[in-house]
Amino acid sequence: MRLDWWKDGLQVNLHIRPAGFVLAAVYAIACWAARQLSLDQFYLPAGVRVAAVLLCPPRLWPYLLLGEYAYFAQMRYPMVEKYGLTWVILASASLMPAVMLLTRLHQKLVHATTNIWLISLAASSAIVVSLINRSLSELLWPIPPVTPYFTSVARYMVGDFIGILTIAPLVLLWMRQSSDRENKPGFSTATIAGLGTMIALGLLATLVPTESSAAKTSLQLLMALPAIALTCLHGWRGAAISVPALNLVLGLTMASPSPTSFDAATFATQQIMAITGAALLVLGSRITHYYHQYRIRDFDGKNAIKLARTSHIASEMDLRERALHLRRLGDGIDMSLGEIVSWLKQQGHHTIATSLLHTSAVHSRQFREQTSMVYPTSLEHLGLYVALQAGGVREAWELTARVLRPQLGGDPCRLSVELQLATYRTLTEAVSLLLKSESGQVRVRARCGRVGHQSGIVLTVGLLDSRRSLSDATVALATERLAGRTLAYSGVVQCRRNRIRMALFETSTSSNAAAMQSSTLDQAGVAGLWAVSKH
């Protein structure tokens, strides 16, 4: 059974794509055009080769091979008599398969979150292709090259590496433009300014006399500064544009009387730029990676704050329904007691009726005070300060004989009901915490204000005795119990000496709590509102 294929033969399905021949022709023309702008130390066809393999799926790679052979055929056919047919065929047929194999080995990393693998692919492709080229020349040329082996390999390697870093990052950036939705403001302006600076410095370098090699080298090195700035500002996108532009401007401004000419002074600069370009691509990739991580964490944090705020509002609405239900029950009880009092008076039991009326009034008032502590309905109509001064919380504070009359400033009615409710809960919780954990009288202060575009309220709950300090247990408890609600409203909690200071801020101008969006609190705004609260 294993030898049936030997007798019956093999069936091969060959799918010819007309578009593939167009691709082969386009690739050959691109390599030819890139060769016209290249030197051995600045070899753009190497970048075209790697970029084409990255851009095309494996099913189209045979057509890239065809285009590679067509490109080398028109260029190396006249060299057959000088270098031999064996070298022309082997040197032309071995480069693209080697790059395809290296790309295949890097295939698992192509979709990685960072783009550092591109440096590995560029370096390995440049090394392998340079070694193949120089080794075949040593073995197959009738007269071996005059240039020392390692010297020519180094030139080819640097030229290929720079050529790859000139084209491949742009192709990779174009491939990922659909998945990369990062849109930092000022990207176009910074890119135009950076590229313009590079071109201007490159033109100045060409105008420098040949004798002033140090000045020319300094201008060429200065071209790296805009590339560094773009990378730091815009991460991978900035590096993917600035590094190719840097290599291209540097390569095109070299003195090149022939494609095989060599500029020793510029070659030293190119080696520095090659290392710099690789470092910038790595740095830009890491900047973008960590920036995306920051955005994800920032989004998760804002979403968590939004969910916490929504949860608080939902809890308040549930308490509101319970308070309204209790109020209806209280109204029913008052009505029933009123009917009983009327019946007793009609029966002549005036003393019992008066006593019952007095007792029911006291209990009704206490019942309503407790109901207002479940949910301060007066806050919706009259504001936070009225709810603090006329509700059940005022009665509870007076019974302790330890809470001084609150010092309230500003107009809380300009704040949203949701923020006033959060302030009410936070303030009562802070007072309750000090009453239970500390001794002595307690002072309460609150002030509404506006700093810039930020509206909010600052609360201070502290001991009257300024010489005392809050215990460590009280500070830890205050931070644990009060931070959740304040953070939900972009606020902060601080425990300083004998007091607890809290700030809560509006997060949206919309009155719909479910549509509120979290905003980052400006610390200068907190300090400004605290400064306002002191007056």
Image (spheres, rainbow, N blue to C red):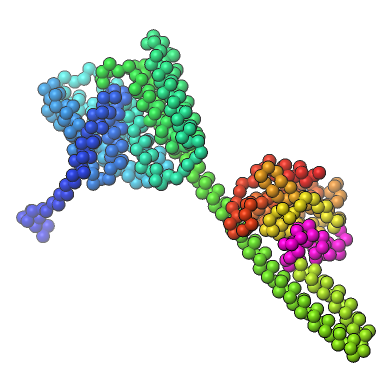
Residue beneath the point at 64% across and 54% down: 488
Residue beneath the point at 73% across and 67% down: 374
Residue extending furthest toward the bottom: 347
Q: Quadrant of residue 28?
A: top left
Q: Could you say which is closer to the camera, residue 78 or residue 415?
A: 415
Q: Is residue 231 above or below residue 432?
A: above
Residue beneath the point at 26% across and 40% down: 100
Q: Quadrant of residue 93?
A: top left
Residue extending furthest toward the left: 7
Q: Could you say which is closer to the camera, residue 346 or residue 443?
A: 346
Q: Is residue 401 above or below residue 89?
A: below
Q: Could you say which is closer to the camera, residue 524 or residue 115?
A: 524
* 216 relative position to 380: left or right: left
Q: Is residue 268 above or below residue 120?
A: above
User: Is any part of residue 530 visible from this angle?
Assistant: yes
Q: Position of residue 170 (x, y in %)?
A: 37, 36
Q: Which residues are magenta?
A: 373-402
Residue beneath the point at 14% across and 52% down: 13
**Quadrant (top left, top right, bottom left, bottom right) of the C terminus:** top right
**Quadrant (top left, top right, bottom left, bottom right) of the N terminus:** bottom left
User: Is any part of residue 422 visible from this angle?
Assistant: no
